[in-house]
Image (spheres, rainbow, N blue to C red):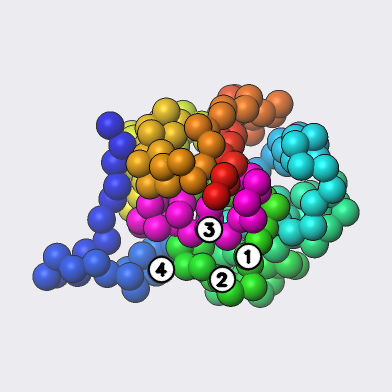
Amino acid sequence: MSKLHKYEDQNGNFDYDKYVEIQTWGNKSKLDFCWVAEQNIRFLAEYIQSQLGEVAKGVCHGTRQGFEQKWFSESLGIEVIGTEISDTASQFPNTIQWDFHEPHPDLIKLDFVYSNSFDHSYDPEKSFTSWVNSLRIGGLLFIEHSKLHEEPGATQLDPFGASAEEIIDLARQWCGSGISQGELLDMPAGNRFVRHLKAIVFQRLD
Ligand SMILES: C[S@@+](CC[C@H](N)C(=O)[O-])C[C@H]1O[C@@H](n2cnc3c(N)ncnc32)[C@H](O)[C@@H]1O
């Protein structure tokens, strides 16, 4: 069963300021830490080229120090922008301070979207549909996933926990025939916390 932590004020209403405060605290307390593995981003860049050929625009969501956009950019020879909710965003190249749940007027008609921060969504349907809508028809969405992103891993800081299969089921409920079935790719590298990482890949169909 998937799990979604709630951010509520004393009256039980959604407390957005609390969400931003907790995410910003988490970002600052791990500012020197990098989760993403370079080998995996280079692998996904090759996958993108094999599926789409030359591409022009990509975005990564929840990027902290911005390594994923740097490695996509180097591999694909294009500019890749990252979003980051924390006010530390301005310290890192090609990173804008932005809540990834919200559609950004300039980040549209994208060839691809990548995130290893989907578990930081307070509303996974809102972030997922926003990311799909930011793609061009045929564009690819990659959600990095591991055992640590499942239900027991859901906390105040990582509010959404779900298995890859649950995410695929939910995605179909949210987007119906507008996206492909959802494919699981085994990534070549782990990191110091988890040996096996996967990417869940969806293609925007209409
Ligand atoms: C698990 S860390 C991953 C950081 C980086 N991608 C890495 O591999 O090291 C999640 C990041 O997402 C950011 N974040 C959380 N919620 C966000 C949101 N709604 N919009 C944009 N960034 C968010 C956090 O501040 C944090 O830096």
Q: On residue 67, which mark appears?
A: none
Depth check, mark 1 against mark 4: the one in front is 1
Depth check, mark 4 against mark 3: the one in front is 3
Magenta residues span 121-141
Could you tell me how far apart the alpha carbons at marks 3 and 1 are, in whole angstroms?
8 Å
Q: Residue 20 location, x and y as percent?
A: 41, 68
Q: Answer with mark 1 or mark 4, whichever residue precedes in sequence.
A: 4
Can residue 140 be seen in the rendering of this structure?
A: yes
Q: Quadrant of residue 176?
A: top left
Look at the numbered discs 2 and 1 and tell me whether their residues touch, using CB distance below 8 Å.
Answer: yes
Quick one: SS at disc 2?
A: loop
Q: Answer with mark 2 or mark 4, whichever residue precedes in sequence.
A: 4
Q: Residue 86 location, x and y as percent?
A: 53, 69
Above-or-below relation of 205 to 22 = above
Could you tell me how far apart the alpha carbons at marks 2 and 1 are, in whole angstroms?
7 Å
Q: Amino acid at mark 4?
A: Val
Could you tell me how far apart the alpha carbons at marks 2 and 4 are, in whole angstroms?
18 Å
Q: Quadrant of residue 56?
A: bottom right
Above-or-below relation of 128 to 149 = below
Q: Answer with mark 3 or mark 2, whichever residue precedes in sequence.
A: 2
Q: On residue 104, which mark appears?
A: 2
